[in-house]
Amino acid sequence: MTTEGRRSTVRELEREFNRLFVRRRFNALQIARRLDPEIEPASYSVLAALQHDGPQRMTSIARQLGIGKPTLSRQLATLAERGLVTKDTDPLDGRAQLISLTQEGLERLQGAQQERAERYLTMLETWEEHEIETLSGLLSKLNRTYADFDAAHAPACGAEEVRP
């Protein structure tokens, strides 16, 4: 049974998440503009997934990011046009394509990530190191909780695995 106090606390947490996600979207827009003014903010996540996991098929990227193939296809076309990714035939299946970061894409992504890291360093100057460690640990715990919850409920709600 959930107490009303706990329910109220969770509602306040949800409001704070909403504020954070709005800020994150704005941050993603700024990063995307630094990478290339022609790409969509959501394309940053595509580039980051390729950086983290290496070359992948489109279906894998779409599943990982929880986006549809038409949306991803449009983003990949723009990213390829801008020289940030390449599409090559998958050596394991000639019918499929492997999407990879280009050297330019990697360098531009790393530059944007470095700028973002410096922004966080400056922004969190007034925080104690243990506060940053605590927040990082709690966010890690929340991401694991999300993954466990989604894995347990995926058959019931049709959710696909999304890496945080």
Image (cartoon, rainbow, N blue to C red):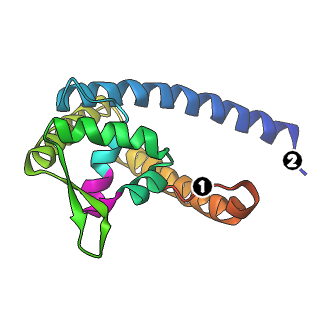
Residue under the image location 57 percent in, 60 percent down: 147
- Three-letter code, disc 1: Tyr
Residue 101: x, y in percent?
19, 52
Q: Is residue 4 visible?
A: yes
**Badge nearest the viewer, 2 or 1:** 1
Quick check: 135 above or below 93? above
Tag 2: Cα neighbours inside 10 Å, few (<14), some, or many (≥20)? few
Residue 155: x, y in percent?
71, 63
Tell me the residue that label 1 is attached to.
146
In the shown orientation, is residue 164 left or right of residue 119?
right
Residue under the image location 29 percent in, 59 percent down: 52
* The quadrant where residue 57 appears: bottom left
Front residue of 96 and 98: 96
Residue 136: x, y in percent?
43, 50
Tag 1: Cα neighbours inside 10 Å, few (<14), some, or many (≥20)? some
Front residue of 134 and 10: 10
In the shown orientation, is residue 7 left or right of residue 136?
right
What's drawn in magenta, residue-wise?
49-57
- Three-letter code, disc 2: Thr
Q: Is residue 53 one of those drawn in magenta?
A: yes
Tell me the residue that label 2 is attached to.
2
